[in-house]
Image (cartoon, grey):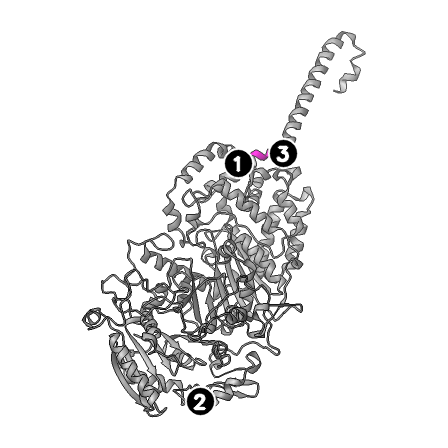
Amino acid sequence: MALGKYSRVDGRKSSSNYCSTVTVVVFVALCLVGVWMMTSSSVVPVQNSDVSQETKNEVKTPVTESNTENNNDARNDESSNAAVEDNRPRDEGQQKQFEDSQGDLPEDATKVDNNVSSNQVEKNDKPEGTENSNEDKQEEKPVDEKKDDVLEKKEDGPKDEPENAEKNRVDGEPQVENKESESGETKVNNSDDNEKKSEENSVKTDGEKGDAQIVEKEENKKDEKTDQGPIEKKENPAEVFPSGAQSELLNESTTQNGSFSTQATESKNAKEVQGASQPQNQNTYSWKLCNTSAGPDYIPCLDNLEAIRKLRTTKHYEHRERHCPDNPPTCLVPIPAGYQRSIEWPTSREKIWYRNVPHSKLAEVKGHQNWVKVSGDYLTFPGGGTQFKHGALHYIDFIQQSVPEVAWGKRSRVVLDVGCGVASFGGFLFDRDVLTMSLAPKDEHEAQVQFALERGIPAISAVMGTKRLPYPGRVFDVVHCARCRVPWHIEGGKLLLELNRLLRPGGFFVWSATPIYQKLPEDVEIWEAMKKLTQAMCWEVISITKDRVNGVGIAVYRKTTSNECYEQRSTNDPPLCKDSDDPNAAWNVPLQSCMHKVPVAPSERGSQWPEQWPARVGKPPYWLMSSEVGVYGKPAPEDFVADYEHWKRVVSNSYLNGLGINWSTVRNVMDMRAVYGGLAAALRELNVWVMNIVSIDAPDTLPIIYERGLFGIYHDWCESFSTYPRSYDLLHADHLFSKIKKKCNFMALVAEVDRILRPEGKIIVRDKVEIISELENIFKSMHWEVRMTYSKDKEGLLYAQKTLWRPTEQETITYAIA
C-alpha cells in the first residue's frame, strides 16, 4: 500500500495499479461484510433457546477449550443422541433413583447462592455471545456453535463424559462436584464474602477473562477447600447431597419420555429457576404474630373455637377432634416469655424448664400421683402415673412378669398408649428398647401432651371420639390403657373395636383400671360388660393380676390369630365388617361397630408376627412381593433395601458429619415425608425418635414403617399437625414443599413448620432448586439462620436453624378467640 502514492510518477503503471486498488478495496469490503455478519450473529440473544440454568455454567468450559472439532461433532451427533435418549426405557431412570454411580451425576453442577447478586442475574440474562466479548472476537466463535456445545454436553453427559472431564477429576470424582459442596458451606458462614466475590467476578475487565479467569477460579476453589470444616471430609459427595438420580419420588411419572425430560420441560424449568433466582427483597414477606386465646400453645385444628361452638353435640368428644380452618393461618405463634433451649435427653425425662411450658395446674391436681411437680425453675417428673405411683419401670417390668410373652424390646416393639397423661409409661419404655406412640386429648389435663414432648417423649394430641385414629390397621404390637377414661364398653364397644382394628393379630391389650380390682357397683357393672364384649370379640384373657406395690390390677388380653372363633359365635355381634371396608383407611373415616377378618394367607400382612427387634428394622417384610412395584420403580423388596442403603449413606456421610449438627441437642425428629422410614432406621443408633409422616395422597407405605419396628402417622400437610408449638428439634422435608406448592397454601406450611419447630431447632429440606431458593429467602425474612445451601442437577439441599425472633405486629385469628 505504501507504493500507491508513487503510482502517479509512473504513468505506464497507472492502469494496472488502478485495477489492483479496486481489487484490494473489493476484498477489504468483503472481509468487512463477513466480519459484520459474524459479529452480528454473536449478539443474537440466546434466551429463546431456553437453555437451563445448568447449561449457563457449562458454557464456560468449552470456551476455554475452543475446540471447533467438538462443536462440529456436536452438530452431527445431536439428533442421534437425542433419539437414543428419548427411546431409552423408562425403567432405567427409575432403577437409578438411589444408585450413586458417576453416570448418574453430570459433570457440572448448579449453585443456589444465599443472595444471588443482581450482577449475576444480569450476567445470566445476557446473550451468551456477549459474556466474554473480547474472547468471542478473537476466536470468532458464533453463538450457535456454543449452543451446540451445550446441547452436546446435556445429551451426552449422562452417558459419556467429555474427554477433558478427566482433567477436572479429583480422586475419581468430578472436581466440579467437590467445588459445589465447598461453595455450599462457604455460603453459610461467609455469605457476604461470597456476594462480593460474585460481584467482583461479574465486573472483571475483558482482558482478565478467558483461560486465566477460569484458572483463577479453580485456584480460589482449591483455597476454599483447604479452609473448610468437616463438610468436605467425604469420599463420595454423590452419596451425601441430592442429585437428580437420588431425590424425587416418582419423578419419572411426570414426563412422557421415560426418565428424560423434553426440551419444552427443560425450557419451562429454566425460566422458573431464573425467576426464582431473582434476588427478592426480604420485606416482601410480612410476618405477624398470631393473636389467639391459646396464645403460645395455639394448635389451629384443635383451637378452632368458632367451629367448636357450632357443634350440635359433644357427647362423643367431638369438641376434642380436629376442626381445621378453611384458610390455615400464616402468622407466627408467640414464644413464652423466658423461653430457653430445652434440656437434653435423658435428663429431660426427669425435669424441664418451667418457663418453656408455664403450666402448674396439672401439678396441683396430679402431684400426689407423681405425675408432675413444680420445683423452682423446673417442672419435675418422678416417673409416676395414676396406676403406677411408685414409678413406671416397676409397672413395666410387672407386666412382663405377668405375661412373659410380651417380651419388651424383642417381640413387642411398637406400643400405643391411650390416655397417656404426661407419657411416663412411654418415656421409660425406652429403657426396654420399646417405641411408644402416646396419645391424649387437649383437655382439662392442662398441657399433658406438651409436657411429654418437652420431656423428649413421642406424643400427639388426639381423642377416641367419632373417627378412626390416623394409623393403619394391624400395626401395634401392644395397646395400653391405664385409667385412660375411655368408656370401652358403651355403644356396642365401638371404641374397643377401634383398638381391635389397630392391634396386630396375636397382639396384647393391657388394661389397668379400677373395674379390674374394685368392687364398687359402677366398677362391677363395667367389668361384666367388658367380659362379655371381649369374649364376643374373641379376645383371650391371658392374665389378671394385682400389682401390690402400686395397689392396682392389670388385665392382659390377646387378639385372635384366626377367624374360626368368629365363625363359631352363636350371634354375629359385634358384626364382621364388609369385605369392602379397608382396615387401613383412617383419614377422617367414621368409626364403625364391626370387626375386620384376620388375614390368614401366608403372603398377607398380619398373618405372621414380624421378626423380633432389631432384626425387623432392616429386612423387607415377608408380605412385600417381588411382583409388586415399589415407590421408586423397582420390585418392592429391592426398593425397600435400596431406600434403606441410600439413607444410611446420607446420614453417615452428610447428616452426622457434614452439616455440623450437634446431635446431643436433637431428640424429637419428624420426617415430614417418609416413604419406607429409611431415615428413621438410619438414625436408630442415636438418642432420637422419629415421627414418620405419610401424606394421605402419597403411596401408603405406613404399614411397612410399622412392620420394621418404627412408627408414624397419616397427615395432610394442607392442614395443621396435631401437636403443640415448639415440639420438634429437627424437621426433615424431602420434596414436600414442591408438592404442597402445587396443592395448597405454601406460606401456611412455612408458618406451620415455624410453629412446630423449637427455637434453635433445625430443618433439612431436600427439594428442587427453585424451591430451595424461595425457602432460603423466606427463612431469612423470619430471621432464621441459613447454615447451608447446596444444589446439583436442579436438586437442592437447605439446612437452616430457627431463632427466637418474633414479629411485633399482631394478626387476630377471629375463629380462635373465645
Kind of element beneath mark 3:
loop
Label located before the other in sequence (1 or 3): 3
Kind of element beneath mark 2:
helix
Along the line of sight, which residue is nearer the eye, 273 or 589?
589
Label for residue 369?
A: 2
The answer to whether residue 405 is visible is: no
Q: Position of residue 411 (x, y in %)?
A: 29, 74
Tell me the mark number nearer the camera, choosing from 2 and 3: 2
CB atoms of marks 2 and 3 within 8 Å: no
Q: Which residue is mark 3?
A: 42
Task: Check if residue 142 falls in the magenta segment.
Answer: yes
CB atoms of marks 2 and 1 within 8 Å: no
Cα–Cα span, label 2 and label 1: 77 Å
Q: Position of residue 166 (x, y in %)?
A: 48, 46
Task: Check if residue 497 falls in the magenta segment.
Answer: no
Residue at (55, 41) in percent of width and height: 51
Image: 104 above or below 288: above
* Image quarter hosting the N terminus: top right
Cα–Cα span, label 2 and label 3: 83 Å
Cα–Cα span, label 1 and label 3: 14 Å
Along the line of sight, which residue is nearer the eye, 548 or 696?
696
Label for residue 148?
A: 1
Kind of element beneath mark 1:
helix
Q: What segment carries the magenta color?
A: 138-144
Q: Position of residue 757 (x, y in %)?
A: 53, 69
Amino acid at circle 2: Gln
